[in-house]
């Protein structure tokens, strides 16, 4: 099987760090682009559509993440399974995995469309969306979920490309789609006065273009990654593997979303100033998190390929190189963001009280954020080794349940009923989860030989 194509990275031989860097940096840039284009969506609808429109789009984020996370976990399963077959040189199984995954992406999208379109308004009502925002938010969700199949196709297709080390071409696709999304936002909102519907429609169209391009790339592949649309089918054995790895990953994402909702409700009790400062700080955290997460995703794919090749020593090296990279990137960027914190928060608000509230969170999070990256990196390393359930259990106990108990007990003590104690729950939960994952890693790597 040839390994010299420019769009492939053979992770089973050669220098690890340079290959991990070549793989991870495009992922980092992809995530940063997504953050920037998402911010552009908010700016367009906020400045041109009004406060209710901004609230309508903003209020749907947690719900979209909650519903999409479960199915997006299956794309992680796709990445692990395809990378393992690629590393093991199992060409026939790899072809079956590609066609199974792409059909699964379509079926996942159809299921999400049905759930999102039919239940959007009811769920928003349960979430106590304000009456003046409810209808706009429901409209946005119905349009978004009407085109969510394209999102699933892109996620699964890019996961397949990542499995062979191709992270550059998905980056190019994302950049093109992001530019189109921004232009369509301006056209629909400014020229056609479509407000929230225009922003949603622009998102759907850009996602559809992304899906088309990633499918086109796979159809034009000349190797075992070639996609033949007429050959789409579900191989039961491979489907079980994808679900076995992907479903726990999706469930983990849902649990994190739920725990963050509880944390947010506690923050809301301190009033609008803290809510605004907290929201701005969270936006800034996203840029550091995605930078660390690129190397976490690298650990996932590198461990998967080397597991398929039976090269356990390279798995060990991958884990520690990725962990060191995450620590350096996370600590360095956190220091920069904390140092320029007031200026960066000033982009979001002119209110000095809001800026100070944001700094209150940043002092806690950015001094410890690399631990979050280490936690995710170790979790993905274990998942790449084929053990998907264990990271879910540790995350559920160490992060989700711990935060809920923290809010229900420590936070309720009057002297500890402060924003600082809420923020402190994050680094403690990250550290506990990382320690548990580290113990699990040592057990699994010993068993692997």
Image (cartoon, grey):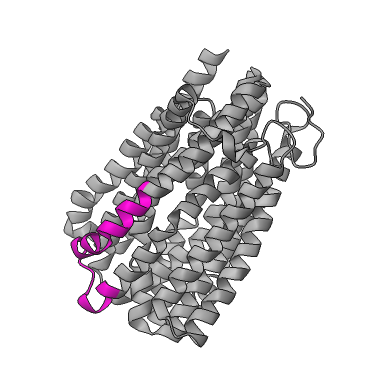
Which of the pair 429/417 is nearer the observer? 429
Q: Position of residue 185 (x, y in %)?
A: 52, 76
State whether residue 40 is above or below residue 391: below
Q: Position of residue 381 (x, y in %)?
A: 54, 32
Which of the pair 315/114 is nearer the observer? 114
Task: Pick the quarter of the image with the N terminus.
Answer: top right
Q: Residue furthest front?
A: 230
Q: Residue at x 48, y 49 (%)?
A: 152
Dominant secondary structure (helix, strand or loop) of the stretch shown in magenta: helix
Task: Pick the quarter of the image with the C terminus.
Answer: top right
Q: Position of residue 305 (x, y in %)?
A: 63, 28
**Is residue 212 at all visible to an observer of this figure?**
yes
**Is residue 368 at all visible to an observer of this figure?**
no
Which of the pair 2/359 is nearer the observer? 2
Does 401 lie within the magenta span?
no
Query: In the image, which residues are magenta?
Result: 111-135
State whether residue 156 is above or below residue 306: below
Q: Where is residue 180 in the image (x, y as percent from the top left)?
A: 60, 69
Task: Say left or right for 19 vs 288.
Answer: right
Q: Which residue is drawn at 31% across and 36% down?
A: 397
Q: Quadrant of the rendered structure where residue 118 is? A: bottom left
Q: Which residue is drawn at 65% across and 57% down?
A: 173
Q: Residue at x 50, y 54 (%)?
A: 150
Task: Say left or right for 11 vs 333.
Answer: right
Q: Total label count?
A: 0
């Amino acid at each position: 099987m040839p390994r010299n194509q420019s769009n492939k990275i053979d992770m089973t031989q050669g220098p690890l760090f340079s290959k991990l860097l070549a793989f991870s940096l495009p992922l980092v840039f992809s995530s940063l682009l997504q953050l920037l284009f998402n911010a552009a969506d908010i700016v367009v609808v906020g400045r041109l559509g009004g406060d209710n429109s901004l609230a309508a789009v903003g209020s749907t984020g947690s719900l979209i993440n909650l519903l999409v996370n479960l199915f997006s976990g299956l794309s992680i399963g796709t990445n692990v399974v395809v990378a393992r077959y690629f590393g093991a040189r199992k060409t026939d199984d790899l072809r079956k995995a590609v066609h199974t995954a792409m059909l699964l992406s379509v079926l996942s999208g159809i299921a999400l469309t049905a759930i999102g379109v039919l239940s959007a308004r009811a769920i928003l009502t349960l979430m106590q969306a304000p009456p003046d925002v409810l209808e706009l938010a429901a409209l946005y969700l119905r349009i978004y979920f009407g085109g969510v199949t394209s999102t699933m196709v892109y996620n699964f297709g890019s996961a397949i490309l990542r499995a062979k080390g191709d992270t550059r071409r998905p980056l190019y696709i994302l950049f093109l789609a992001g530019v189109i999304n921004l232009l369509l936002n301006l056209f629909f909102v400014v020229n056609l006065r479509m407000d929230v519907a225009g922003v949603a429609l622009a998102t759907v169209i850009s996602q559809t273009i992304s899906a088309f391009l990633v499918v086109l790339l796979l159809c034009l592949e000349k190797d075992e990654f070639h996609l033949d649309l007429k050959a789409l089918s579900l191989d039961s054995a491979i489907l079980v593997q994808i679900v076995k790895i992907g479903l726990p990953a999706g469930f983990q994402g849902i649990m994190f979303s739920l725990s963050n909702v509880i944390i947010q409700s506690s923050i809301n009790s301190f009033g609008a100033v803290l809510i605004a400062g907290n929201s701005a700080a969270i936006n800034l955290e996203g840029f550091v998190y995605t930078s660390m997460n690129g190397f976490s995703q690298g650990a996932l794919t590198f461990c998967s390929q080397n597991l398929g090749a039976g090269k356990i020593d390279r798995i060990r090296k991958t884990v520690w190189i990725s962990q060191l990279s995450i620590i350096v990137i996370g600590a360095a960027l956190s220091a920069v963001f904390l140092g320029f914190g007031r200026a960066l928060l000033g982009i979001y608000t002119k209110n000095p009280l809001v800026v100070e509230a944001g700094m209150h969170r940043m002092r806690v999070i950015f001094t410890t954020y690399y631990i979050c990256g280490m936690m995710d990196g170790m979790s993905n390393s274990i998942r790449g080794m084929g053990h998907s359930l264990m990271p879910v259990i540790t995350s559920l106990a160490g992060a989700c349940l711990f935060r809920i108990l923290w809010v229900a007990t420590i936070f309720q003590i009057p002297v500890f009923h402060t924003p600082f104690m809420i923020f402190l729950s994050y680094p403690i939960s990250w550290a506990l989860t990382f320690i548990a994952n580290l113990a699990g890693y040592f057990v699994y790597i010993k068993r692997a030989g």
